[in-house]
Image (cartoon, rainbow, N blue to C red):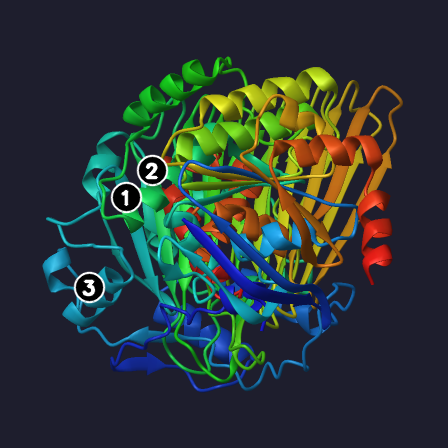
Amino acid sequence: MLDITNLHASVEGTEILHGVDLTIKPGEVHAIMGPNGSGKSTLAQVIAGHPSYEVTAGSIVFEGSDVLELAAEARAQAGLFMAFQYPVEIRGITNAYFLRAAVNSVRKAQGLEELDTIDFLDVLEKKLAAIGWEDSFLNRPVNEGFSGGEKKRNEILQMAVLEPKLAVLDETDSGLDIDAVKAVAEAVTKLRSPERSILIVTHYQRILNYLTPDHVHVLADGKIVRSGGKELALKLEELGYDWLRDEAVAIS
Amino acid sequence: MSTIDTHVQKPYQYGWETDIESDTAPAGLSEDTIRLISAKKNEPEWLLEWRLNAFRHWLTLKEPTWANVQYDPIDYQAIHYYSAPKQQKQLESMDEVDPKLLETFEKLGIPLSEQKRLAGVAVDAVFDSVSVATTFKKTLSEAGVIFLPFSEAVLEHPDLVQRYLGSVVPHTDNFFAALNSAVFTDGSFVFIPKGVRCPMELSTYFRINATSTGQFERTLIVAEAGAYVSYLEGCSAPMRDENQLHAAVVELVALDDAQIKYSTVQNWYPGDENGKGGIYNFVTKRGACRGRNSKISWTQVETGSAITWKYPGCILQGDNSIGEFYSVAVTNNRQQADTGTKMIHIGKNTRSTIVSKGISAGRSQNTYRGQVKIMKGAENARNYSQCDSMLIGDQCGAHTFPYIDVRNSTATMEHEASTSKIGEDQIFYCQQRGISAEDAVSMIVNGFCKEVFRELPMEFAVEAQNLLGITLEGSVG
C-alpha cells in the first residue's frame, strides 16, 4: 500500500525528516508517536503533498506508483486521505456542497460519472448512518463556527464519504476531551476494512485504546527510532519519551 | 512562484477588435464638438443648450484627486468624443444591421438576431457612441414599457426625457458627471408606467471598439407608482496599450411603491499584467427613491477596468423607502478600484443595506468608500453595512473608508468589517480532498461573495461566478 524509503524533507531550508523508512500493508493500522517537534506532522504533510515541504531525498510509493511527482489533488484522487490537525474554514460553502465537489473531483479523475445533488444526498445519509452521526452540520459552512470536536468529526465524515485506500490521521485526538476522542476513534474503527490502511499520527496513547494499532513507531528527531506492537504505546505512556532518549544516550 | 500567483493569470477573453468602418469626430473637446454630437443625433435645441451649459460648468472644474487611485493626467483634447459604425439609413428591422455588428455581439454572448435571442431578456446593444439594436421592442411596448436607445427616446419622448434628465445627477454634481452631460452619446432610456411590472429583464450591453475614443453613455430609468423593473448592464472592450475613458451617468427614479433592481457585470479591459492599457471607468450612478415605500437595489460585480471610480447610491427621500447596495469588486495585477456607495436618508423609516466584498490579487489596490448620511427629518432610519475584504497573495492592498454622518438620534446604525486571506493552507485543504487549486480558489471566492451573487438575476449569477473564476485564474500557483 505505502512504502516510504529513506525520506528526507525540509521546510524553508531546514531539514526535519532525516531518513524515514515505513511500510504499510493493506488493512493495517499503524501509529506514529513521538514528542513535540519530532517531525510527526511533517511526515503526514509530506505524504499528503503540502507544497511548503521539500523532499530532498528518498521516495514515497503509494499503490505501486511514486507519488512525489504528483500534486496533492492527484494523490487525493488516487485514494490518499489526510485528516487535518487544524481543519480549515471555508466561508459561504456548505459542508454538503464541499463534500460533493470533493467526491465528484475524485470520481471525475477516476473516469466515473459525477453524482447529482439528490444521488449524493443518498450516499451521504448512508455514510452518516454507518458511523452513527446525525446530519445537523451538513448545511453549515465548512468548519465555520465548529467546535474543536465538531471539526475533527467533520474530518472523519469526509474520510467516510471519500472512501480512501489510505487515511493519515494527523493528531486527530489533539484538543479533544476523552468522550470526543472515543467517539472519533470508534467512528474510524467502523471504517476499518481489509483493503483500507490507516496511519495515526499522535502524541498520546489514549486514542489507541479505542483504535487498536497493528504497529507502533516512535519518531524522534526526524527518524523512526523504535517500532513494535501495540504494547510499545503503553510502555511510552508509562515511561515517557525520555525513556527512549535516555536509552539512545546509553547506547551511544 | 506560489500557487496563488499562477492562479490569477488568465488572458482577457474579450480583447479582440471589430474591423468596421466608422464615422468618428476629430479628437478634441470644444463647443463645436458638442454641436456636432447634437447635430448627428438631430437633437432638439433645449438639449443642445443643456449640454453647452454643462460644458461651460465643466470648464470651471478640476479633476477630483481624493480617490485612492493613481494615473497620469488625462488629455481631454486627445479623445474622440463621437464614433459610430457607418450606416446608410434608418433601420427597419434587425436584418438590416451590419452583420459585423451582429457577429460582434454574438461573440460576446449577446445574440441579437430574432432566432437566437436570450429568452426573457430584452437587450439594447451599444457600440461605441451609438445603440445598434434593441430587441423585444414590440413585446415591451405592448406592456406600455418604453425601452429605447437614449437618442431615440429624446426624439420620441422629449417631455419625459426633459422632465427627468439630470434630476438625480445634475451636471453640477461632479467633474465626470459634468463632462458626461456635455458629451454623452447614447445609452438606454427606460420608462415603466404606473402599476406595470416589466414583463422581462432589461439589459444594455456596452462595447467600446474604436481606438482613442471615450464612451460617455447616459442611462435613465423611471419607474412610476407601483411599477417594477429589473435591469442589467454588461460591458467589454478590446485590449489596447492606451487607456480609454468611460465616464457614464446612470439616473434612477422610483415613485410611490415602485421598485428598481439595477445589476451590473462590469468587465472592461483591465490592462495587462504590468498595468499597460485598460479602461478608466469613472462613473456616476444614483437612484432617487422619491415615492413612499419605493425601493432601489444596486448589485454590481466589478472585475474589469484599469481604474474604477464609482459609488452607486440612493437618495431615500420617500418615507419607508429602501436602498440596497451589493457589491463584489475584484482587482488583479495592477488594477485599482475605489468603489462603494452613498446612502442619503431623508424620509422617515428609511432603510439601507450595504454589503461590499472586495477581493484583491496580484499588485492591485482595492478600496471601499461608503457614505451613510442620516438627515434631521429621517426619524427611525436604519442602516446595516458589511464590508469584507479578501486578499490573495501578499502584494495587494485592501482599504476601507466608511463615512457616517448621523443628524437624527433615532437612527440605528450597524457596521461590520472583516479582512481575510486565501492562504496556501485553505487551498491545500481543498486539494487534499481531490479538488484542484483553481477550483479551490474559485470555490473559496464564490463562498465569500455568496451574499451578493444571490441578489443577481439567475442567468447572470452563473455568468458572474464564471467571470470571477476567469479573472482570478492563475492567481494561485
Question: Label 1 to label 3, Cα distance in Å?
Answer: 15 Å
Disc 1 residue type (three-letter):
Ala
Number of numbered callouts drawn = 3
Q: CA distance from mark 2 to mark 3?
A: 21 Å
Q: Is residue B345 left or right of residue B262?
A: right
Look at mark 2 in the image and give the residue it sits on. Answer: B201
Side of B317 relative to B375 (left or right): left
- For mark 2, does the 10 Å Cα neighbourhood hold few (<14), some (14 to 19), or many (20 or more) residues? some
Quadrant in the picture for residue B322: top right
Name the residue tied to disc 3.
B102
Spot occupied by residue B130 in the image (x, y as percentages of width and height): 34, 65
The residue tagged 1 is B122
Say whether marks 1 and 3 touch (CB < 8 Å).
no
Q: Is residue A146 visible?
A: no
The amino acid type found where label 3 is placed reads Leu
Going from the N terminus, do you reach mark 1 or mark 3 first? 3
Query: Which of the image's four quarters has the C terminus of chain A?
Result: bottom right
Q: Alpha carbon of mark 2 to alpha carbon of mark 1: how far?
A: 6 Å
User: In terms of depth relative to the viewer, which is nearer, B52 or B66?
Assistant: B66
Q: Are marks 2 and 3 in contact (CB under 8 Å)?
A: no
Q: Secondary structure at mark 1?
A: strand
Up-down relation of residue A23 to residue A96 (above or below): below
Say above or below: B156 vs A180: below
A240, above or below B126, in the image? above
Of the numbered discs 2 and 3, the one sitting upstream in the chain is 3
CB atoms of marks 2 and 1 within 8 Å: yes
Q: Amino acid at mark 2?
A: Glu
